[in-house]
Amino acid sequence: MVKICCLGAGYVGGPTMAVIALKCPDVEVVVVDISAARIDAWNSDALPIYEPGLDDVVRRCRGRNLFFSSDVERHVGEADIVFVSVNTPTKARGLGAGKAADLTYWESAARMIAAVATSDKVVVEKSTVPVKTAEAIEKILDHNGRDGVGFQILSNPEFLAEGTAIRDLLAPDRVLIGGRETAAGRAAVQALKDVYARWVPEERILTTNLWSAELSKLAANAFLAQRISSVNAMSALCEATGADVAEVAYAVGKDSRIGAKFLNASVGFGGSCFQKDILNLVYICECNGLPEVANYWKQVIKINDYQKSRFVNRVVSSMFNTVAGKKIAVLGFAFKKDTGDTRETPAIDVCKGLIGDKAKVSIYDPQVTEDQVQRDLAMSKFDWDHPVHLQPMSPTAIKQVSVAWDAYEAARDAHGVCILTEWDEFRSLDYARIYGGMQKPAFVFDGRNVVDAEKLREIGFIVYSIGKPLDAWLKDMPAVA
Ligand code: NAD
Ligand code: UDX
């Protein structure tokens, strides 16, 4: 029986291993983590992450061939294949701060693997890492491992998106495996390929050299984020000219060379990956003496920051250039629908912008707790992706911020409503009821283009939708970006 151990029971480690366990009933899969609280949650009925379909997969495998444990060293010692899916946040301090990947967690994982391994191991990079990380990991393993114990390192980056993780894992566009071009390297690649081949068609399992696999992950995220920044840049021009970004995106996406996906204009992209991985790419370009390439990718982040501040400026300028003392309802705090994840969510920057202008913010999100909102708004940039248990547990609550139990409560007595996550339930709210309970003039700022703006205007709202032709009111109150 092949034994797999995965270090890191997070958004990637948990779902990925659950699907491997589901598809390979004869393989024992143990997910371990240094956070005992996270492991306890995986072993309970309330899993630590919200992901559609995950509960069902875990219920079917847990206790059969899927286990969650805090006994890290024992399970690493027993495994044939060790996945490492620990976090690789942006460095918050020191050399490369604000850009470079912080490999502290990865390095300590590698040192621990070397220390406890008494048999040969295939070590799989599941985390997203800078190109050439495998070389560094190899050195750590080889210099610290016991005599006679061999390590093969593979790069197997993960392409799942949150909210659709189970679907993505069950039917991936591709699985990418990079390894050393030696006999032992090829054997390790084959061993991992055999695991995925249980459910992924052979032609979708791509094998490359180590550096191509590592770089492909950063490149894929950079290309995806670039599409969003491209359409968001167009959204600003649409507002200035009377074009409609949805129509432009549709027309552009009809070109089969471009394609229709990932062209939804928004208040900005969020999530734990895009910004972090592009900053990492930028840093690698700079370190390799490629400032022009670095600047090219930096622009994707700059447009994203511009889009978030443009949104805040639009809210403030529309409401007579001040939101001081006004209640603003924020609908949606997660970085996208169908997840409770708030890492790098655009809602953080938008709320901080509104709070900075002295607004009172009332937030509703179906999956985000008050504690999480307060923690996110209290945290400094780049501290967010470090393990949850290392973050301040009870930050001083920001008094201007409250969390409501539903959208109606959030919007009661509000001057404006900002929609920041595209949760389906926001499409079908009773907006006439919301309007009735709001201060007048009542505003809706739709950062995700989920509402029918014309219907809301008939009710009486002044509506701003990203990249759509502006109301006369908004034209008269131009936002300075
Ligand atoms: P996460 O923070 O949810 O999970 C990481 C876990 O690793 C944490 O629970 C932490 O306690 C644990 N950990 C840290 N050091 C450890 C150690 N030495 N031993 C055991 N456990 C340890 O992070 P995530 O979202 O799952 O991301 C993990 C990696 O996967 C990152 O490199 C990320 O860039 C990449 N990735 C994430 C996504 C995503 O959608 N979240 C998608 C693709 C790739
Ligand atoms: C992303 C990649 O898609 C995935 O392949 C990788 O493994 C991890 O990073 P994720 O961040 O989970 O996944 O979600 P994704 O669906 O990519 O959305 C990222 C952000 O972009 C969200 O804030 C989303 O709302 C935003 N987005 C997405 C847009 O603003 N417009 C779009 O058209 C698509």
Image (tube, rainbow, N blue to C red):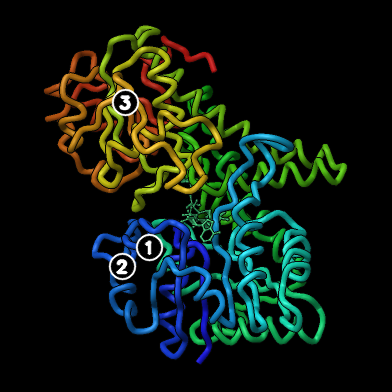
Q: Is residue 138 above or below residue 397?
A: below
- Residue 255 in percent (x, y) is at 59, 55
Amino acid identity at mark 1 = Ile
Instruction: Using residue 5 as the reference point, say whether residue 325 is left or right of it.
Output: left
Crowd rating for badge 2 (residues with CA inside 10 Å; few <14, some 14–19, many 20+): some
Amino acid identity at mark 2 = Asn
- Residue 226 in percent (x, y) is at 62, 44
Question: 2 or 351: which is nearer to us?
Answer: 2
Query: Gap between marks 3 and 2, in whole Å?
Result: 31 Å
Query: Residue 286: which disc?
Result: none
Q: Are marks 3 and 2 in contact (CB under 8 Å)?
A: no
Disc 3 or 1, which lies upstream in sequence?
1
- Describe the element under mark 3 as helix, strand or loop: loop
Tell me the quarter of the picture where residue 468 sits.
Answer: top left
Tell me the quarter of the picture where residue 473 sits.
Answer: top left
Residue at image x 37%, y 62%? 39
Classify mark 1 as within 8 Å of ligand 1 or not, answering yes or no: no
Disc 3 or 2, which lies upstream in sequence?
2
Q: Is residue 60 above or below residue 110?
A: below
Q: Which residue is mark 1?
A: 39
Query: Gap between marks 2 and 1, in whole Å?
Result: 6 Å
Q: Which residue is mark 3?
A: 397
- Nearer to us: label 3 or label 1: 1
- Describe the element under mark 1 as helix, strand or loop: helix
Amino acid identity at mark 3 = Ala
- Describe the element under mark 2 as helix, strand or loop: loop
